Amino acid sequence: MKVGILGGGQLGRMLLQAAANYVVETYVLENDPHCPAAHLCTHFKKGDIRDYDTVYSFGKGLDAITIEIESVNIEALEKLASEGVQVYPSPAAIRIIKNKVTQKEFYRDNEIPTSEFVITENIAALEVHTHLYPAVHKIGEGGYDGKGVQILENQTDYSKGFDALAVLERKVKIKKEISMIVAMNRSGDMVIYPPAEMVVDPVLNLLDYQLSPAILPEKITWKAEAIAMKLVKKLNSPGLFAVELFIDEKDEVLVNETAPRVHNSGHHTIEANYCSQYDMLWRIIMDYPMGNTDPILPSAIVNIVGAEGFAGKAVYAGLEEVLKIDNVFVHLYGKNETKPGRKMGHVTILHKDYQDLTHKANKIKHLLRVIS
Ligand code: ADP
């Protein structure tokens, strides 16, 4: 089978690691020939994943195509799909999700719980919908690395908003942020991974580490599962999806956003679950039986990001100390250059005891630094 991946970042890289277990010829399209996925694929093609002609000529002749990022040329995928190339997820699903405006409308139209919102066309509209404040303003398209999201606490914050098509939504009093990964095959069968929870440092307020399975009352897990599965059923597309949810102060479960692809909140499934999210997507693409999503052991993920004040050739200070710790799995993404905040890798920790996970996650956060 010949399968193409649009995008050559770390998600593509881990997808290719899983592909090595199957009989599959892989193709990657990406502008940067030194990207994390470049040397793990069978064929690398340099090009812009947002350009119609480039994506169309890349996909022509392939059996299937998938994405590792949403900012792709959907029209080219539609054309390829009409000519018989299997596209995971469907171009229609990518179209809904790619824009935060259509994504929110999809939740509303399908009665998927999400925070109350209005669509705003320009900055002047922010003064009209005062009943939603404190609110969060999210640009429809083009936001990345948190740059498309602004918290608007009150009227004095209007000017921080986006003068473009955007979503203004009520700010949720978040008790927990969780993520659920759902996979659907071509026959419409679905499987779901246990929820993962983001543990945020209350002092620094940075995304600190992730635990899975999340520590949640059973009833909330069931509610989150039902919502995530309904959402994917309504998207009506084969593929793998990560549904990010908020649990608010009243234990209401609300969808924040969905990613139509393998996701950073599922990295732990490589070691911590019987079938990883990456293996699962290959099984779906190759029309094989879906795998077992059960956890083997609870796990934590610590992201390895470029330290403040360092830019240039990456050096992983403390790596040997980290590798001495039991049941710790280091993944470096093969990016030569570091800069502050750049995602350079992650570490997965396995242990039956959550206290041990938390202890090791904190220890690793302090031991391992990406400098230059
Ligand atoms: P991005 O696409 O950049 O990841 P998100 O929509 O996930 O943007 O928002 C980033 C973060 O902002 C979320 O993880 C959450 O902590 C916070 N956030 C987003 N929407 C809301 C909301 N409605 N209420 C409260 N916090 C929110």
Image (cartoon, helix red, strand yellow):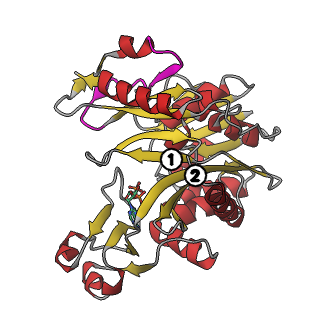
The answer to whether mark 2 and mark 1 are in CB contact below 8 A is yes
**Relative to 104, does residue 142 appear above or below in the rendering?**
above
Residue occupying image coordinates x 62% and y 44%: 66
The percent position of residue 10, horizontal first and vertical second, equals 47, 33
Which residue is at the front of the view, 69 or 357?
A: 357
Label 1 element class: strand
Name the residue carrying label 1: 197
Please state the extent of the stretch shown in magenta in the rendering.
Answer: 324-341
Relative to residue 212, is residue 367 drawn left or right? left
Q: Quadrant of residue 149?
A: bottom left
Relative to residue 99, is residue 268 drawn left or right? right
Q: Amino acid at mark 1?
A: Glu
In the image, which is nearer the foreground, mark 2 or mark 1? 2
Q: Mark 1: few, some, or many residues within 10 Å (few <14, many ≥20)? A: many
The percent position of residue 38, horizontal first and vertical second, equals 49, 27
* Mark 1: C-beta under 8 Å from nearest atom of ligand 1: no
Q: Which mark is residue 216?
A: 2
Q: Could you tell me which quadrant the N terminus lies in?
A: top right
Q: Amino acid at mark 2?
A: Leu
Q: Is residue 33 visible?
A: no
